[in-house]
Structure formats: structure tokens, C-alpha cells
Amino acid sequence: MKAHGDIQMADTKKKRKADEAFRKPSDGAHFNNPNDVKFKNTSLHQKAEALLKTRQQLPIWPHADEIKQKVRDNDVLLLVGETGSGKSTQIPQFLYKEEICQPRQRSGETLQKVSKSAENVTNGAQTLRKAQKSMIGGHIAILQPRRVAAISLAARVAAEVGTPLGSSSPASTVGYSVRFDINVSPSTRIKFLTDGMLLQELLRDPWLKEYSVVVVDEVHERGLNVDLVLGFLKRIIEAGKAGGDRDGRSGNGLRVVVMSATADMGGIEAFFARSTNDLKQEESGSANSTNGTNGQVNDKNADEWVGFSDDEVSGKRANRSNGTNRQAISGEEITVTSCHIKGRQYPVTIHYEPKPAENLLDTAMNRIMHIHQHTPLPGDILVFLSGQEMIENLESLCHTYAQSLQEKQLPNHEQSGTKPSRLQEKLPALQILPLFASLPTHLQSRIFQAAPPFTRRIILSTNIAETSLTVPNIRHIIDTGKHKSRHFRPGLNLDTLLSQPVSRSSAAQRAGRAGREAPGTCWRLYTQSDYYNLEADTQPEILQTDLSFLVLTLKAHSVDDVLNFPLLTRPPRRSLEAALEHLLNLDALDAATGKITEIGRKMSMLPLRADLARALLASTTAELDCVDELVDIVAALSLEEGIFLPLHKKAGDSSMPKQGQKKSTSELLLDKNKAPNSAVDDDNDDSDTGATSPQEQARRKLLSRHSDHLTLLNAIQAYASPTTHDRRAWCDAHAISHRAMSRIMDVRKQLRQLMSGPKFRLGPSTSRTASPNDSTQNSLTAITDPDVKSRVLKALLAGLWPNVAILTTLAPQQSGAAAVNPNQRAPYTTLLTTQGIHIHPSSTLFTHRTVAGGGKKEDDKSGAKARQPAGISSGMAKAVIFTDLIYTSKAYARNVSAVELGWVVEMGRLS
DNA sequence: GAGCACTGC
């Protein structure tokens, strides 16, 4: 069963309720062997019996014996399970009672035997506990790429097994482990966890001794974490094969099941089947390959190898298929087998445009009208678009259309008495629902509510509906073939976020969303030949992201030779080198040996980006001494979404903005006309009480004019202050996202707990330590002490100093600004990469008054200064640090703070 | 001078 991306499950309170539902019947059960029948709760048991009938209908059910046998006989099973096959819920249930999944002592005895003999000993319980600790295996891990999937699958499987979920009862067999929420009991056998959680466990236990089987689900999504995990799993299996207890598992080899919804598993098969030594050789041969994917065995992919003649490619292929002579490092080779399960999908008819669409929005609108006028209900329409902007544009077109339908039908009918055409008479009403990640939860969840009678729903969505959410009642898909994707450019040290064509597998996934409940149709707004020109698969994340995290994780696992770690897809050498350099800049690696430093090790244990982790560590020194402040800032920065909602014009209006209303977060940026004399002399400007809404005035109190980071700090401290009794009301009053704030509080709590221990402190002990609890001694008003401000900014600088930019007018003239956009002169230039950058409009440092020709505000008196070069103002800070650099229409720096250049020099970073 | 696809620790 595919997890229905249940938004509600993300809501902690609701989830708790769900947990309690499981918890209740188990009250009174006392701990013993959970497999013992007498401890199975009757009502849970009955429910499980009822669910069994459904399970037996699943396409995977008849393959149970085959799958068990294959897992017994092989190290790795590759399982292609199409949508609706039931793989994620049934595989762990097939396996957990198998002999190979029983926990064993090093001697090879199973736990049952040990516990039997323990009964005859005086301190039996202690013996048993000790035995349990030294046990190998016994657990099955099922890795999921998303938290909601891990939690909802665990709930479902617990119900099917008939035992309570997680830590609620000692009789539980199924649990889950995701960030902020570890829900397992000592008796847990089946554990659903996010891939990131397993990486954390790998740091503590490199050989995963707790597990007999690791099931990696949804590999086709190819997230960075999954690629890392696959590399570690391969190493564990290889070490086991080499013998001599090199893996510390005493010959109890780890079994791996890799599951994917798409058929192309050739690459993964070759990845496991070839020894790491073979991989090394091939990599050195393919050093020129820009996207050198290892282990591609089918012809199509083999031809894509760059830098080889046909002969060389076919030679390689011959080598790969000649598997019988291959040897792993010193033992036997890894055995890999596979299994294909058909899914349960209704057929979806695909339509293409006869010629390329001139205007995607118009074409989409025409399609919507055509479907609406020619197909009967039921059958909602799901439109895939690239982003929020496109969604909002199509949304207003749809509203116009919906209105015209109503106007056409009603007056004709009532006034003239003439009979409307049959189609008009029958045409249902329309309900238009936008759907994207940053949409508030209550608006997102409207897709799960039933439509009013005789109404067709049109859902306008980003690719959030491609994997993360399942929209019910969809029978028609309109696919623009576009999505926005993020690519890291190591040379420029920036991310691009641009609209791009989807891959064929992504297009297939989108089309499949029409066939969940009945036969469907998919209208692709591009030609068939366009389709065949698309990339076969979406690029794995490892090829398009900053690899600092990957490199630091490997180094923390003592993988010093990062270039030769077995990876399914080899990242470009340039990306790896950029990551190594970045980590050297952050003191995480030793410049001479390349090994991880003490600082680096601490960084790797923090759930943060490398640079933010470095900044947080810097705040623990006696000199800077501002842990609490940095925890707050870093918690906010680690959240992708901003906390500030658009301000409402009307005073006292705290409802959400209307659909289609143009949102403008720049309204946050009020009256910033005063020029800074230094980076820390700014006030929180509450002097101007002009014609502003209460929200504007409230928010102004939080504003730190020259620092987005300090503004975030002000907001969090005010929100978390014990004097703020109603936090939701406080959010409404300040137009701040309550969802974002409560997520920040989760991260903050986690970070405070980590930082309260001595483990993370740098240097001699400081006068202050982070307080692990949620309370804060700070008052409601914003930070005003310039000394605290400068210490906070200096701590940030320790992590963000590679992101220092200075006014272009002060920079050396070889500015790289021209490299990105020759027509626009960037106000700032980075010091390290001489890259021209612009301040993002959401920043408090983004000011209207520097616009040539005057700003929009009437009270703008900056006309005299309008002769400055475009984008440059005498009032602008000389030097800034920024957290993110994203190229959309320009290179935009987000989350910016003014700093004094002297600080950078002071820290010995620049001469 | 004007904007952020989606995950995860």
C-alpha cells in the first residue's frame, strides 16, 4: 500500500490521538514474549483478522514464498513493485518471522533459546537483558524518504499485525523512528524509519548489528540519503563476505531488499554485484564523465558513457556480465536477485499536443474547458504546473471561466425562457483548488474534502502531488511537463532554481495519478516527439546538490578516501572538491591530512547544514558566548520556509489573504531610510507610527534593520517568551506563520538538548550554557545590546564567512557579476568567488529608496539620491553575510546581515 | 530592483 500522504498525520496532536487509539486496548498487558498468543489483544487481533482478507487481495500476496526464499538465498533482493502492489506493508510482514530474522547471540543461539535457559538462573532477567544487548539482528528496518510515509505505514502495518503501535505497549511489534518522534518499544521487530534516521544510527553502530534485514523503499526517487545508505549497506555486506568477523556480526550477514516502483534496476544490480575494487577501476577510467553513473548494464545507458568508443563500451559491458569470475575483496561475491510484482492500476490513456503549445497557460485552460464540457462526473482534474506563480495565474483564468459558465446558464434560463443547450444545462459547477508546499495546511487539506454536489474539482498543483500527496477522485491529468528544480553550481557556489522539463519517469508518475480509482486520461501539453526527447529519469540528488553534507558524513565514518567510496552514481569530481574546500574553510577537515577534525566531528552530529553547525559551535566559545541566540537563529534558518506571512492592508484583518490576491512580503520592509553607520548601531524602529496597520506596527517592533538574522532572533524570542501566553494569537497579530514557528520550536528544543551537554562546547567552559528547556529569560522587546548583537553576528560569521559580499563599488573590478547577467549590475560582490549578487526582496536590507527614479512610497524623499548607479545607494552596508544564494531571475542572497569587514579580518579569514 | 519545486537529520 502506498502511503496516502496524509496531511493530518503531520499534525502531532492528531497523531497522538491515533497512537492512543492503539494504546487503549493494550492497557493491562504485562511484558513478556510479545509473540505469545495470550498477550495479543483480542480486539486488535480481530481487526487484524479482518484486514487479512484485504491483504490477501494484494498483488504481492501470492509471491510471499518466492520472496522469502529469495531473501534466504541471497544477500540482496531487488524488488520492482508497481503502484498498489502492497510491497511497503507486506514485505516486512513476510520476513519478520523467518529464521534469518531472529535475533542471535554471537554463538549463533536465538533469543528464544537464551530466554529459556535464563528461566533456570537466579538472576535470569539480568542475563536476558545482557543477552539482548549483545544480540545481533532481530529487527527489520524499512526506510522511507518521508516522515509521513514512515509514520502512516507503521500505523497500517501495526494494525495488520494486530499489535499496538510503537512504545505504547510492550506487546508492540511495529514501531517507527523519525526526527522528533522515536516510537519503538523493546519488543519492536519491524521498524519504519526515514533514511536520515538510519544514517544517524549508522554513526553509532557502523555495522547495523541491530538489524537482520534493511529494506530500502522508493529508491527510484534517488535522494542523497538513500545513495549514502546504499554505499554503507554494500560495505557491510562486503565486510561480512570477507569473513573473520570484520563486520562484527559474527557471520550473521545483513540482508538487503531494495524496492522501486520503476523497472530500471540494472544500475543497482550492477552496483551491488561488482566489488568495490571493480568500481574503483571503472571510476578512474571514466573520470571525464560528467554524470558517470556506475553500474549501468542496459544498452541504452551504456551508450551514454562519455569518453568511450563503442568498442570500449561493449568491452565494459562484457566485463560486467562476466560475473562468475568476479571476486569481492577477499570472500565470495555478493549475490543479487530480483523480483517483479505487477501493480494494481487502471489504464490511463495518454494524449499529446499535435504541435508545441505557444502558451502553456492558455493551452491548459483550453484542456480544462474541453474535459469539463465533454466528460461526465465523477472525475476531478489535476493539473501539474511548475510553481506558485503559474498556479496563481491559471487559477485566475479558471475563476473567470467558472464565472462565465454561471452567467451563461442562469440568466438565459430564467429570463428569456429559451431552453439552454443540453450541455450547458448539464454542466457542473467548478471548484478550483491550488496546491503547493508553502500553502497553509488548512488550505492544503481542502483536497481531501468532498466536493459540493454536482461540482467538478480542478486541482492546480506543483509536483507535491506527484509523490508526497495523493489527491482523491482524480480521473484527468493535465501535465505541462514542467517543474522547478534546484541545481548547485559548485564553481559559483550558488543554487539555481529554474523551471525545467520533467523526465519521462516523472511524466509517467504524473499520468499514473489518474488511474488510482478508475480508468483515466492524461493530457500532456507537449508533443510526442518532445516526450521522447525528455531525459529518461530525473537526475539523482547527488548530482545536483551541495555535497558538504555527504563528504562530512563520510569523513565522520572514517571514510577518508571519499573519491572511492562506492556510490551508485558518482558525483562530478568538481562538486566533491568544492565540498572538501568548503569543509576545510569551516575547520571541519584537517588541511594536511584531510581527516575530520574535532570540530568536524561535532558538526556531523548536529542536525544542521555544515556552515550553520559551524556557527553554532562558534557561539559556545568563551569569547562569543551566545549559544541560546545562535540556537534560535540557526533553528529558523534550517527551516526552508520563511516565518513572515504577507501583511494585510486592513487593520485587524487576521484571516488568510484571498485567493488570487498578489502577495507581497516586501511590505514587511518598512521605512528603512536611515543609513547605517556601523553594522550594530541600528534600532528597532518603532518611532514611526504613521498610517500603518496594527500588524505592521507589531511587526516593526521585531525588525532589526540591518540584519535578517537578528530580526529572526527577535521574532523567536518574543514568540517563545513566557510572557507570550497565547502564541497563536501572537502569530496572528504579527502576521507570522504559526506552522513555521512551531516547527522552529521543535528544532530549537532538539538543538538546546544537544547543546546543553558538555559534548559540543568548544574551548574552555563558558559562563553560560544553553538551557535545555523551552523558557527564555529574555523580555518581549527586541535585542538592543550592541555587544550581544556583534557577538551573535561574529558567531554567524564563523560559519558564513565564505558568504561575505561587499559593495560592488568597493570590490575589485573583475567582478563575476557579468558572468551571470551582463545587463544588470549587482550591488554586492562576493569576496571568495567575485560573484555579483542582489539582495532578495524579502530581506530587511532590501530597500525601496535606492531605486533610481524614486520608490513607490509617497514619503520617499530619496529623489536626490536617484542618480546613484542602479541598485547602489550610499546608505547601503559596506559588507554583508548571507545564508543562501539562489539564482532565479538574478543571483539573490537571502537572509542577509550587515557585518563589519574588520571582523572578517579579525578572525584571520581574510588579509 | 521584486519572489521559493520537494524532501531529511
Image (tube, coloured by chain):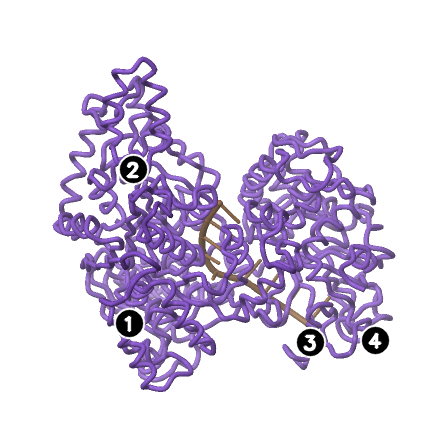
Chain colours: A purple, B brown
**Looking at the picture, which amino acid does disc 2 mark?**
Gly
Quadrant of the image containing the C terminus of chain A: bottom right
Check disc 4 and report its element: helix, strand or loop. helix
Disc 4 sits on a residue from what chain? A
Residue, disc 4 = A867
**Looking at the picture, which amino acid does disc 4 mark?**
Arg
Residue A622 in percent (x, y) is at 76, 40
Disc 1 sits on a residue from what chain? A
Left or right: A165, with A290 as reference point: left
Check disc 1 and report its element: helix, strand or loop. helix
Q: Nearer the viewer, mark 1 or mark 2?
A: 1
Left or right: A545, with A331 as reference point: right
Disc 2 sits on a residue from what chain? A
Few, some or many C-alpha atoms within 10 Å of disc 3 (few <14, some 14-19, many ≥20)? many
Residue, disc 3 = A817
Residue, disc 2 = A138
Along the line of sight, the residue nearer the viewer: A2 or A628:
A628
Label number found at residue A320: 1
Along the line of sight, the residue nearer the viewer: A476 or A298:
A298
Position of residue A888 relative to residue A172, above or below, is below
Earlier in the chain: of badge 3 and badge 1, it is 1
Q: Which of marks 3 and 4 is in front?
A: 3
Earlier in the chain: of badge 1 and badge 4, it is 1
Label number found at residue A845: none
